[in-house]
Image (cartoon, rainbow, N blue to C red):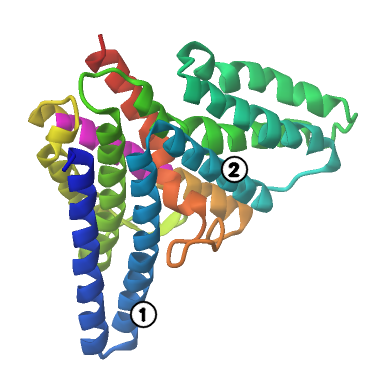
Amino acid sequence: MSPLALVLGVVLLALVAGSVAGKILSRRTTTDEARATIENLNARTRSWWVMVVVFGAALLVGKGATTILFAGLSFMALREFWTLAPSRPGDHRALFASFFLVLPYHYWLLWTGWYGLFVILIPVYAFLALPALATLAGDVTDFLARSARTQWGLMLGVYMLSHAPALLMLETGSEPALLLLWLVVVCQLSDVAQYVFGKTLGRTRFSPNVSPSKTLEGLFGGGFSAALIGAALYGLTPFAPLEAFAMALAVVAAGFFGGFVLSAVKRDLGAKDWGYVIEGHGGVLDRVDSLIFAAPILFHLTRYWFTP
């Protein structure tokens, strides 16, 4: 059995254990508050089954399937962003280009491994082209804020998120798919562990105005636990154990602020969740917010320090 299939098998076993534990706890819970918490955890677990199966299948099929999967996630993330963000008719040219020109071409560059253009297409060429397109409509009302929203949506939903499958183009001497799996495992375990630590031990809120559910106890307890697991899984990476621990800490810290920053954006837009397509989680952006910040950090640290 390949290492990738073995790790995915372990993850599925963990989901089986979580599903069984959730059913037992739901039967033994007596208070309404505890019952609501357990039901939320069970809903998240049901969604995790779907996400793990789809993501695992894409990894097993190969780079092409994984790239297509993340291109679809980017499309959905960008759609969620613009469902909440206000726009005007003058933005339509730029939005059309974002969805149907920049996004597919960016992922085609990733598919073909054209790193030089992949890394500058959006932050340089799209950065210049999209506001230029918007000016053709002649609408100058709130132009600066509208242009900033266009850039933010594309950077978050497409450029930053695409650095996760971009790990597959790195030549580190180990199987690239395992490093992507390691990133996703560390990010998502950190999210889960922070949620559990926050619910059970959380007392000190990190910033109630931005995210009332995030606590210092959740951050440090969940983040440190995820970093330890990342170090234990160093065999999936080109890192030594201490290096894996340090990289996991970087991933955890970046992932935390990914969720934190996107929570601030949601509050500004007056929304609780980005969408409702994932039971117990909200939208795609709610689920990949930590990856959006963590993937570029891991990609560039790995490329700088661990590739020839």
Above or below, 109 against 99 in this view is: above
Please identify the residue farthest to the front as the structure is shown.
Answer: 1
Residue in front for this viewpoint, 65 or 262: 65
Query: Magenta span covers which residues?
Result: 244-258
Please identify the residue farthest to the bottom as the structure is shown.
Answer: 30
Instruction: Report crowding for label 1: few under 14, some 14 to 19, many 20 or more residues within 10 A (C-alpha).
Output: few
Left or right: residue 93 versus residue 182 is right
Does the magenta segment cover residue 251? yes
Q: Circle 1 is placed at which residue position?
A: 36
Q: CA distance from mark 1 to mark 2?
A: 32 Å
Q: Quadrant of residue 4?
A: top left
Say which quadrant the C terminus sits in: top left
Left or right: residue 296 versus residue 76 is left
Above or below, 202 against 267 in this view is: below
Residue in front for this viewpoint, 150 or 158: 158
The residue drawn where x is 55% and y is 55% is 274
The residue drawn where x is 37% and y is 66% is 44
The residue drawn where x is 29% and y is 88% is 31
| Pointer 1 or 2: first along the chain | 1
Any mark on residue 283, and which?
A: none
Above or below, 153 against 273 in this view is: above
The amino acid type found where label 1 is placed reads: Ala
Left or right: residue 159 versus residue 207 is right
Q: Quadrant of residue 177?
A: top left
Q: Circle 2 is placed at which residue position?
A: 75
The amino acid type found where label 2 is placed reads: Phe
Above or below, 233 against 220 in this view is: above
Does the magenta segment cover residue 127? no
Front label number (1 vs 2)? 2
Circle 2 SS class? helix
Instruction: Report crowding for label 2: few under 14, some 14 to 19, many 20 or more residues within 10 A (C-alpha).
Output: many
